Image (cartoon, rainbow, N blue to C red):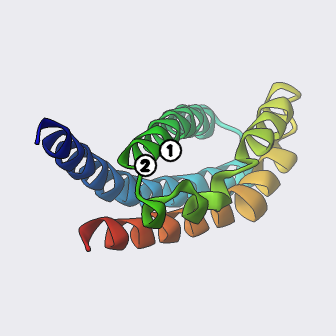
Amino acid sequence: MEKKRGKEELLKAITEGVVEVEGLVGEMRERFLEVVNNLRVKQDEEAFYRLSGGMENLKDLMAFLDQLKEGLESLDNPSLSWKGLNCWEGSTELFREMLSAFEREDWVTVADIIEYELVPILEKGREELKELEHLLKE
């Protein structure tokens, strides 16, 4: 009985987290597209401030995804596996590449990575989170 209640509470917490993060990923996408425009037009303090904030948001997102993976595994339900969130796999390497370009002050590369690689991952990841949300609520 206690174990069942614990899993129900975990399921509720995971569902709430997924709903919240799905919305935040959409906001991150929009902010990163603004950063791309700023980096291509002018490399001012605001562009770097937004880029820095976006990088922090990505770090928080990756921490959430790690916790989500652990939580889904704890539920021990094959229909709620991490496999449905595979677009995030390998994104760590992309973030390293982006950080490296940032450190070299290669703003064109940073903007290209964001626009052509990061934004599509965020879009696909948001869709995958929506699908997971649907599964969690069934």
25 displayed left or right of 91: left
Figure check: 92 above or below 111? above
Q: Residues within 10 Å of mark 2 (few under 14, many from 20)?
A: some
**How many other residues sit within 10 Å of disc 1, few (<14), some (14-19) or many (≥20)?**
some
User: Residue type at mark 1?
Assistant: Lys
Residues 68 and 88: in front is 68
Who's the residue at 50% across and 44% down the image?
69
The number of numbered discs placed on residues in the rendered structure image is 2
Work out whether 111 lies above or below 63.
below
- Image-based side of 78 in relation to 119, left or right: left
The amino acid on which the numbered mark 2 sits, given as a three-letter code, is Leu
Which residue, as the protein is rendered here, is positioned at the far top? 103
Residue 4's label in the rendered image is: none
Which residue appears at 84% of the width and 39% of the height?
A: 97
Q: Position of residue 81 (x, y in %)?
A: 50, 58
Residue 43 placed where, x, y %? Answer: 71, 40
Left or right: where does residue 89 sit relative to residue 63?
right
Q: Is residue 65 visible?
A: yes
Q: Which residue is mark 2?
A: 72
- Look at 18% across and 46% down and name the residue there: 4
Q: Which residue is mark 1?
A: 69
Residue 30 x %, y %: 50, 60
Q: Classify mark 2: helix, strand or loop.
A: helix
Relative vertical location of residue 73 with respect to residue 27 in this rendering, above or below: above
Is the Cβ of the residue at disc 1 closer than 8 Å to that at disc 2?
A: yes
106 vs 12, nearest the viewer: 12
Q: CA distance from mark 1 to mark 2?
A: 5 Å
Q: Is residue 122 visible?
A: no
Res. 100 image quadrant: top right
Q: Camera-side residue: 135 or 20?
A: 135
